[in-house]
């Protein structure tokens, strides 16, 4: 059998390209079956913009409060269960619980303890604070950190606007991530990760908000489709998946000895009449016939017949 085929699609699971649109690659995200609840792409982008605005505002606020040039950068926005979020934090860290009106789960603003103590030293006038050990806050330090957090929450309300309709306040302090109990283990949280630079010191930080406080304003219910729409959406998606197309002669049956004895110049007879069109096959399935033609300097198939599409039985 002699086959003329287009290049097969990429199987790497990262991107695929077609000849017609080689310049516009199609990317695919890995689906995590252990955590099926993920943010829709348009929702993720809206939240990224909100958290990036918050980061800029908070950086400006920190510069004014701690009297050192500060910059906050939003690095990622993810949706995790509270259990996953808590497990990702250091055992000893600074956590400010953020009660949200009308909701049981609380938000969390988390920063390393030594970083927060450095901010306090800056706020009290130290130009170059000495390295601080990992320890809990004194009452005076808690009061100063609480004021920084309250100012950050003002920036959060401004940055989120209509996305955050509930009032968020600064609550109690926790220093052990495993005992904080801001939410139930399975509660979904929108988690933003930040890089916080204050003076010469760079530290990571996170802000976690209950998903139920934000997703309703994003139109979460619109992400669920009815059973009637599911078939249409599936067909629409499949129509954009690249597939390999081949023009095939009728196959010839030969003995292994004949194959092993093939040499340059041998003629291999094919049981394909000269007047019969070639078979069009998509991933091995026949979908029609075509005659051999040309498109510029390249071979092409001129469609002769197509196989009528049949609806699958219910």
Image: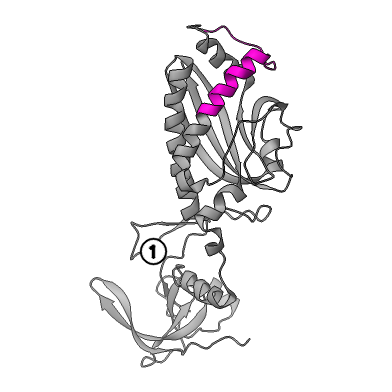
Between residue 235 and residue 243, name the one nearer to us: 235
Q: Say which element carries label 1.
A: loop
Residue 194 lies within the magenta run? no
The residue shown at (49%, 38%) is 157
- Indicate how the structure is coloured in the image: one colour
Q: Which residue occupies the extreme left position in the image? A: 296
Span of residues in magenta? 129-151
Residue 14 visible somewhere in the drawing: no
| Image position, residue 286 (x, y; %) | 49, 83
Residue 241 visible somewhere in the drawing: yes
The residue shown at (32%, 77%) is 300
Is residue 182 depicted above or below 255 in this figure? above
Q: Quadrant of residue 175?
A: top right
Q: Mark 1 points at which residue?
A: 18
Q: Which image quarter holds the C terminus? A: bottom right
Q: Quadrant of residue 87?
A: top right
| Image position, residue 159 (x, y; %) | 45, 39
Between residue 87 and residue 120, name the one nearer to us: 120
| Image position, residue 199 (x, y; %) | 46, 15
Between residue 216 and residue 264, name the one nearer to us: 216
Is residue 150 depicted above or below 239 in this figure? above
Q: Please give left or right for residue 212 compared with residue 136 in the image.
A: left
Q: Please give left or right for residue 143 compared with residue 66 in the image.
A: right
The residue shown at (58%, 17%) is 144
Q: Which residue occupies the extreme right position in the image? A: 179
Q: Badge 1: how crowded within 10 Å, few (<14), some, or many (20+)?
A: some
Q: Quadrant of residue 63?
A: top left
Between residue 268 and residue 96, name the one nearer to us: 96
Is residue 178 depicted above or below 234 in this figure? above
Q: How many labels does the image show?
A: 1
Is residue 214 depicted above or below 134 in this figure? below
| Image position, residue 10 (x, y; %) | 48, 59
């Amino acid at each position: 059998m002699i086959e003329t085929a287009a290049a097969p699609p990429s199987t790497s699971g990262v991107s695929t390209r077609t000849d017609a649109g080689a310049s516009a690659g199609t990317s695919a995200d890995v689906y995590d079956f252990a955590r099926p609840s993920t943010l829709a792409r348009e929702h993720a982008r809206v939240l990224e913009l909100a958290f990036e605005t918050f980061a800029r505002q908070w950086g400006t606020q920190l510069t004014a409060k701690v009297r050192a040039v500060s910059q906050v950068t939003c690095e990622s926005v993810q949706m995790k269960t509270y259990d996953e979020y808590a497990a990702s934090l250091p055992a000893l860290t600074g956590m400010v619980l953020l009660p949200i009106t009308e909701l049981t789960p609380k938000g969390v603003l988390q920063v390393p303890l030594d970083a927060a103590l450095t901010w306090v030293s800056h706020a009290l006038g130290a130009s170059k604070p000495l390295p601080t050990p990992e320890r809990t806050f004194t009452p005076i330090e808690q009061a100063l950190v609480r004021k920084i957090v309250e100012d950050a929450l003002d920036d959060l309300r401004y940055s989120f606007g209509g996305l955050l309709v509930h009032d968020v306040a600064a609550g109690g302090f926790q220093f052990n991530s495993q005992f904080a109990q801001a939410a139930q283990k399975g509660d979904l949280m929108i988690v933003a990760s930040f890089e916080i630079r204050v003076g010469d010191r760079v530290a990571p930080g996170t802000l976690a908000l209950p998903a139920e406080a934000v997703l309703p304003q994003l139109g979460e219910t619109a992400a669920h489709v009815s059973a009637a729409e599911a078939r249409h959406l599936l067909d629409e998606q499949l129509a954009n998946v690249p597939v390999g197309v081949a023009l095939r002669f009728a196959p010839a049956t030969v003995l292994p000895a004949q194959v092993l004895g093939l040499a340059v110049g041998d003629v291999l007879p094919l049981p394909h009449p000269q007047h019969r069109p070639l078979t069009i096959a998509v991933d091995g399935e026949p979908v029609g016939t075509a005659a051999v033609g040309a498109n510029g300097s390249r071979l092409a198939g001129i469609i002769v017949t197509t196989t009528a599409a049949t609806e699958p039985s219910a």
